[in-house]
Image (cartoon, grey):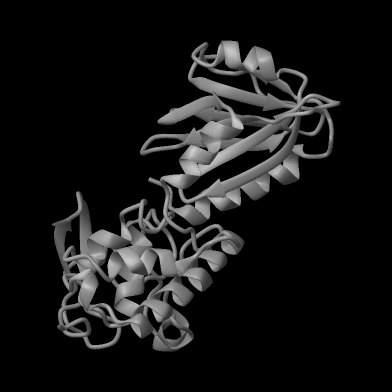
Amino acid sequence: MPEGHTIHRLAEDCAAAFSDGTPLRVSSPQGKFSDAAALLDRAVLHTAEAHGKHLFLGFREPDPEHTDWVHIHLGLFGKVALGPAPAPPPTDTVRLRLTHHASYADLRGPTTCALITDTEKRAVHDRLGPDPLRPDADPAAAYRMISRSRTTIAALLMDQKIIAGVGNVYRAEVLFRHRIDPYRAGRDITPAEWDALWTDLVGLMREGVRNNRIDTVRPEHTPEAMGRPPRVDDHGGEVYVYRRAHQPCHICGEGIRTAGLAARNLFWCPACQHR
């Protein structure tokens, strides 16, 4: 599942491609979004924003009084293809297609693709925790829940009601970077530790938006600095522990461990992240 930085980057890319005031052609070759697409056809995209793993595209008629929102959650299998016009012939797997004179976008396989109102959009925001990539984020709200919980910090970081946008990669990597045992209870995380975790997440995820990939190793631990071969993985990016099970830790040499936690594979170094 894409992590939050991917959705924020997608929002930026959609805004750059389509928010020039040109009415868009909106269609649903697959047919599952046809009624809503017909309502949006010839509307103007004026806003593209993200909250955690949720994308919101705001459409208005040329002389509007209100906004219609398309709410998208890619889930495990959703993909968006953005490209220059002319668009290729659509396949019958395209749930939503946006086209105008310069660009096109095709959405395939999302968990959610729905036309919603302002009130419904606010309800989605209200059930999500603060997003490190949003200017309105309140990290203290997340810490209030974390500091009262007996649940492991690794599980809490993946709970989108507590903090939105953090996925398996950022969860594993930020805990390693701060030498925090992933099995520590949330209530055992100090305010200073939480402030450091949050600040680091903001920086790492902003970098992820800029580069469109996740890199978490510090300069002194890059392949060039350490004289080691670069990582080869479909995920891409240089990381400390994610998907490095049984490989030696870049810092201490201990074998990286893995285990299931919160329905995902957890990765950590037992030496660097001891309790």
Question: Is residue 14 visible to the viewer in this orientation of the structure?
Answer: no
Name the foreground residue: 80 vs 275.
275
Query: Is 210 situated above or below 57?
Result: below
Query: Is 219 situated above or below 63?
Result: below
Q: Toward which corner of the image does residue 97 lie, by quadrant? A: top right
Name the foreground residue: 121 vs 131.
121
Q: Quadrant of the N terminus?
A: top left
Question: Is residue 84 visible to the viewer in this orientation of the structure?
Answer: yes
Query: Is 208 situated above or below 187?
Result: above
- Residue 220, percent across and down? 44, 88
Which residue is drawn at the image coordinates 21% and 78% (left, top)? Answer: 188
Name the foreground residue: 163 vs 165.
163
Which residue is drawn at the image coordinates 81% and 26% (left, top)? Answer: 23
Q: Left of 126 or right of it: where is 189?
A: left
Which residue is drawn at the image coordinates 55% and 68% (left, top)? Answer: 207
- Residue 264, percent across and down? 22, 52
- Residue 245, percent across and down? 19, 66
- Residue 271, percent across and down? 16, 84
Name the foreground residue: 186 vs 148.
148
Which residue is drawn at the image coordinates 46% and 46% (left, top)? Answer: 126
Q: Left of 59 or right of it: where is 221?
A: left
Q: Quadrant of the C terminus?
A: bottom left
